[in-house]
Amino acid sequence: MINKKRKKAQQEVMGFVVIVLLVIVIGIMIFTFSLQRSLRKPSYIEDIRVNDLMNSIMQYSTGCEFEDVKGIIERCYNSEKCGNQDACDYLNEELRKILNATLGKEREYGNIIGYKLVDESGKINISEGEERGNLVASKYLVPIFSGTTTTNVEVTLYIYFGKIQD
Amino acid sequence: MRNKKRKAQLQIQEMAFVLVAIILLFGLVLLGFAVFQSAKVKQLAYEIRKEKTIGMLDSIANMPEFSCKNAYCLDEEKLIAYLEMPNEQKETYNNIWEKSKIALIKVERILPEESGTCNSQNYPDCKTYTLYQRNIDYQAYSTFMPLCYYDSIYGWKCDIAKLIVGFEVPKVK
């Protein structure tokens, strides 16, 4: 009689364990699904936009004898002038104006937290906003001709995105 | 004997309840799974449409009808030529855009700041080129492009523009 009762109790415990396991498995599935949704990767439209912006900046014709930005960078590295102004000062002013016109509104109302445009030597140094969030960067090599030698200057644009756009 | 029969009936009843509970539980799980799958399919359709639009941005920028000869940019004179094309010729392009589910192709000059719609009389002192537009719901994506033209005094000159492409939003039935 006691044996029969114990067997029945064991069976009930087993049933309970099975139900608990089932609930845990379903719970894990739901948790994994919600985690996957929250860890969405940055969209590749941002990559394209940052690269295209970098290309547009470099080709932009400035007010310095209608020379493009690449040409002003070359003037800056060769310690030349733009009118009466130092080419590096003019370059930084122009770049700040361009970045403000292209990214300014998105930084105020869109999903951009901050941006930074720099080169290796520190002659170009523009930054606005905060440096956090998802980073998308684009590099551009500008050839500098000085006399008989040619060197390449690497200019990098960093853009920090907050919530990634759908 | 009577007691035994009653006990057996009770056990059968108990089993029936357990079976119903299990079926309900699995039914709920299946329902959840179906909802999850349908959401996944909808998300996938959205992603595919988005990727297609983004790919289209590049394709349109690279079309010989709009692009520059030597660099990756939009040729403003070609945009003017496209706008002034006779309607019969434009129809061929319009059919291509419609088949590709495109609802809008627009180029907006950002720098220098200008305003107004562009035509052969006022370019480059203008802002917008609407190359194609259909009056339907669309979702738009944009990228930056150099917008270049030939200046008779200063030579080749480039501004910064935004290329905007809108894709038809499918109707939900």
Image: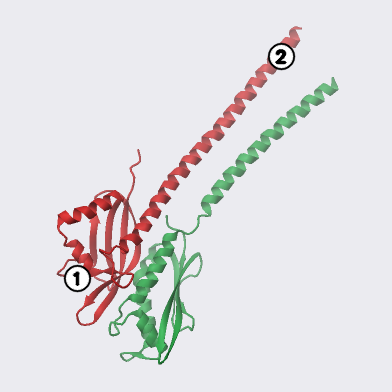
Depicted B146 relative to depicted B165: above or below: below
Please tell me in which quadrant of the rendered image residue A104 appears: bottom left
Mark 1: secondary structure = loop
Which quadrant of the figure has residue A96? bottom left
Q: Residue at x 85, y 22 (%)?
A: A2
Q: Which residue is mark 2?
A: B8
Figure check: A15 above or below B88: above
Q: Quadrant of the N terminus of chain A?
A: top right
Q: Which chain is red?
A: B
Gap in angstroms between the C-alphas marked 1 and 2: 94 Å
Q: What amino acid is found at the position of numbered circle 2 in the picture?
A: Ala
Q: Are marks 1 and 2 in contact (CB under 8 Å)?
A: no
Q: Quadrant of residue B64?
A: bottom left
Q: Which residue is mark 1?
A: B123
Q: Quadrant of the C terminus of chain A?
A: bottom left
Chain letter belonging to callout 1: B
Does residue A111 show up?
no
Query: Toward the viewer: B64 or B108?
Result: B64
Picture coordinates of residue B66, whole percent (x, y): 26, 65
Label 1 CA crowd tier, 10 Å (few <14, some 14–19, many 20+)? some
Closest to the camera, between mark 1 and mark 2, is 1
Expressed as whole percent of the image width and height from the top left, the position of residue A92 reads 39, 81
Q: Which chain has been coloured green in this picture?
A: A
Question: Numbered disc 2: what chain?
Answer: B
